[in-house]
């Protein structure tokens, strides 16, 4: 089954015990105001860009100053590398380091929160999860924050 854990805090993720190979998507959403926010994310199978997927870490931004967008880009590129590609309000770091483990996600969320003075909310989606893993909280994540995703695994 596919399942998405949403509204996770940094501590939730750092304490988690899930197998990274089952994660297929994560997002760290950073609030900067009522409508101003940005999110750093990754998809295991690549993020759509034109007709081909781009592999690597990406981010989107909404109503934040260009100076902040550039600071986020520079920060992420210095940590993970990659070639910068732009598509409207999304920035792709093509070929950047990819990761899905709880420690790296949790530490990145903490760094983003501190560096950009933004409360964070983390979402992690898994594939091939079993009902026992979700209901028994074997991933170390609260089952109350799990949303099953309908459809094929």
Image (tube, helix red, strand yellow):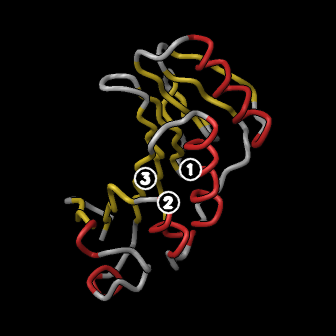
Q: Position of residue 47 (x, y in %)?
A: 51, 36
Disc 2 vs disc 3: which is toward the camera?
2
Q: Position of residue 19 (x, y in %)?
A: 54, 76
* Mark 3 crowdedness (10 Å alpha carbons): few <14, some 14-19, many ≥20: many
Residues at discs 2 and 3 in contact (Cβ within 8 Å)? yes
Q: Is residue 140 left or right of residue 84?
A: left
Q: In this figure, what is the number of numbered marks?
A: 3
Q: Position of residue 77 (x, y in %)?
A: 75, 33
Task: Say which mark, if any, is on residue 10.
Answer: 2
**In terms of depth relative to the viewer, which is nearer, 151 or 34?**
34
Location of the C terminus by quadrant is bottom left
Residues at discs 2 and 1 in contact (Cβ within 8 Å)? yes
Residue at the image position 27 percent from the left and 62 percent from the top: 152
Q: Position of residue 31 (x, y in %)?
A: 41, 34
Q: N-terminal of the two: label 1 or label 3?
A: 1
Residue at the image position 50 percent from the left and 75 percent from the top: 16
Q: Mark 1 = which residue?
A: 109
Task: Say which mark, if any, is on residue 24.
Answer: none
Q: N-terminal of the two: label 2 or label 1?
A: 2
Q: Quadrant of residue 6?
A: bottom left
Q: Is residue 122 left or right of residue 100?
A: left
Q: What is the distance, in whole Å, between disc 2 and disc 1 at their CAs? A: 7 Å
Q: N-terminal of the two: label 2 or label 3?
A: 2
Q: Mark 3 = which residue?
A: 122
* Mark 2 crowdedness (10 Å alpha carbons): few <14, some 14-19, many ≥20: many
Q: Secondary structure at mark 2?
A: helix
Residues at discs 1 and 3 in contact (Cβ within 8 Å)? yes
Q: Secondary structure at mark 1?
A: helix
* Mark 1 crowdedness (10 Å alpha carbons): few <14, some 14-19, many ≥20: many
**Above-or-below relation of 11 to 48:** below
Q: Secondary structure at mark 3?
A: strand
């Amino acid at each position: 089954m596919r399942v998405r854990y949403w509204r996770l805090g940094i501590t939730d993720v750092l304490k988690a015990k899930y197998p990274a190979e089952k994660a297929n998507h994560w997002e760290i959403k950073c609030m900067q105001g009522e409508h101003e926010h940005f999110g750093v994310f990754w998809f295991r199978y690549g993020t759509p860009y034109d007709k081909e997927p781009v592999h690597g870490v990406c981010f989107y931004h909404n109503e934040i100053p260009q100076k902040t967008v550039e600071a986020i880009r520079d920060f992420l590129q210095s940590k993970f590398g990659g070639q910068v590609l732009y598509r409207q309000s999304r920035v792709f770091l093509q070929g950047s380091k990819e990761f899905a483990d709880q420690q790296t996600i949790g530490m990145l969320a903490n760094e983003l929160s501190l560096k950009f003075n933004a409360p964070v909310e983390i979402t992690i989606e898994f594939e091939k999860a079993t009902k026992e893993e979700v209901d028994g909280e074997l991933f170390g994540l609260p089952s109350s924050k799990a949303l099953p995703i309908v459809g094929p695994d």
